[in-house]
């Protein structure tokens, strides 16, 4: 069993933290630019309820793109995989997460997968409900169930900052609306999507969500099946093939843990059948992934043979 104590984790965090200075925080979203570049924290949540951690574990951060895989799970539960994948594809892409290029060359013009921005916007569009507030509350309630923490909410400052600067995401929405992939008011969808991305939690919460995915959708405390095993399987597959933006292939080879990152510096990992991982390190590499977080996962994977391959 990996990392029997927080002392082991603290040693790995100290090693990985040295990488942080060679990255930069995501200042293209003004509110995220306020993060401390040197922060690095991790939690590992086991099925028996034990959780070991290191770093500033109480510090909250916004999910950003990590929310994409959680939203996908909710929509798959609501609508079923056949319906969802009529609207968004299953294939990885080597393009940046915010690229519009493939939409112009695909026929029909549906996004390649749910982990790029265009695909995530389509998945968010598919959340059931009669208003932005009702749909957001459904997603938030799902997250409360996954984390067993009903205090989790979203950061209004980050949501507002993203809403005001999301010009490229609006362009993606209008392109998708032109091709009848999206059928709602673009500003309403942008409000819902930016609130979704601004949901905030700490690494302890994130590790617990990772554990539910690792356990094929089962709550580790109650034993309740929060999501069907097939939904958890689909989500973990996307985490492997598309979860780390266009560095996913290299990540799979070097680390081999189903993971999803976000530009706030969060990474959620799900080691199948074993444990969940939550990491926060806001200094990013050129692909938009936490540079110290990836190093930390690489050390964990090599030291404890965690690769699923």
Image (cartoon, helix red, strand yellow):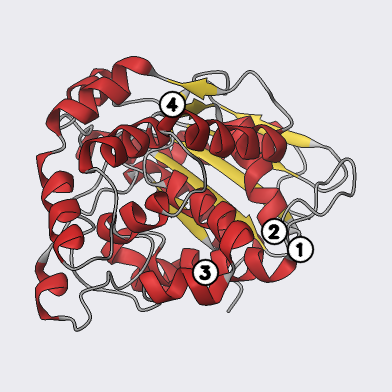
Residue 121 vertical position relative to residue 196 in the rendered view, above or below: below
- Who comes first in sequence, dot 1 or dot 3? 3
Residue identifier under label 1: 273
Q: Secondary structure at mark 3?
A: loop
Residue identifier under label 2: 214
Q: Position of residue 62 (x, y in %)?
A: 41, 30
Categorize mark 2 by other alpha carbons within 10 Å: few (<14), some (14-19), many (20+). Answer: many
Residue most extreme to the bottom: 107
Asked if one can make out residue 298 in the rendered structure from this viewpoint, the answer is: no
- Which quadrant of the structure image shows residue 155? top left
Q: Which mark is residue 61?
A: 4
- Who comes first in sequence, dot 4 or dot 2? 4
Mark 2 in CB contact with mark 1 (< 8 angstroms): yes
Residue 60 vertical position relative to residue 172 in the rendered view, above or below: above
Q: Quadrant of the N terminus?
A: bottom right
Marks 2 and 3, how far apart in space? 14 Å
Categorize mark 1 by other alpha carbons within 10 Å: few (<14), some (14-19), many (20+). Answer: some
Residue identifier under label 3: 256
Categorize mark 4 by other alpha carbons within 10 Å: few (<14), some (14-19), many (20+). Answer: many
Q: Nearer the viewer, residue 233 or 11?
A: 233
**Residue at point 42%, 44% (across, down):** 293
Q: Position of residue 46 (x, y in %)?
A: 78, 46
Marks 1 and 3, how far apart in space? 14 Å
Relative to 168, 116 lies left or right: right
**Residue at point 30%, 41% (across, down):** 189
């Amino acid at each position: 069993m990996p990392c029997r104590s927080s002392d082991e984790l603290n040693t790995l965090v100290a090693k990985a933290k040295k990488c942080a200075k060679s990255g930069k925080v995501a200042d293209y979203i003004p509110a995220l630019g306020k993060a401390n570049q040197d922060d690095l924290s991790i939690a590992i949540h086991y099925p028996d309820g034990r959780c070991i951690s290191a770093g500033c574990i109480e510090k909250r951060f916004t999910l950003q793109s990590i929310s994409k895989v959680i939203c996908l799970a909710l929509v798959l539960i609501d609508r079923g995989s056949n319906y969802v994948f009529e609207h968004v594809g299953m294939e990885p892409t080597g393009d940046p997460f915010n690229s519009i290029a493939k939409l112009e060359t695909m026929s029909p013009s549906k996004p390649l997968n749910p982990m790029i921005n265009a695909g995530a916007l389509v998945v968010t569009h598919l959340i059931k409900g009669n208003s932005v507030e009702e749909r957001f509350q459904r997603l938030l309630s799902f997250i409360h169930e996954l984390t067993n923490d009903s205090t989790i909410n979203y950061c209004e400052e980050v949501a507002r900052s993203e809403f005001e600067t999301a010009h490229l995401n609006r362009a993606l929405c209008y392109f998708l609306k032109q091709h009848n992939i999206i059928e709602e008011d673009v500003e309403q969808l942008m409000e819902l999507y930016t609130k979704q991305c601004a949901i905030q939690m700490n690494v302890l919460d994130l590790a617990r969500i990772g554990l539910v995915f690792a356990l094929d959708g089962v709550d580790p405390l109650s034993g309740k099946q929060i999501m069907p095993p097939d939904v958890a399987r689909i989500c973990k597959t996307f985490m492997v093939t598309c979860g780390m933006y266009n560095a996913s292939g290299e990540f799979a080879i070097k680390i081999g843990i189903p993971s999803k990152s976000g530009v706030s510096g969060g990474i959620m990992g799900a080691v199948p059948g074993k444990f969940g991982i939550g990491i926060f390190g806001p200094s990013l590499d050129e692909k938009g992934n936490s540079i110290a977080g990836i190093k930390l996962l690489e050390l964990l994977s090599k030291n404890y043979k965690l690769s699923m391959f």
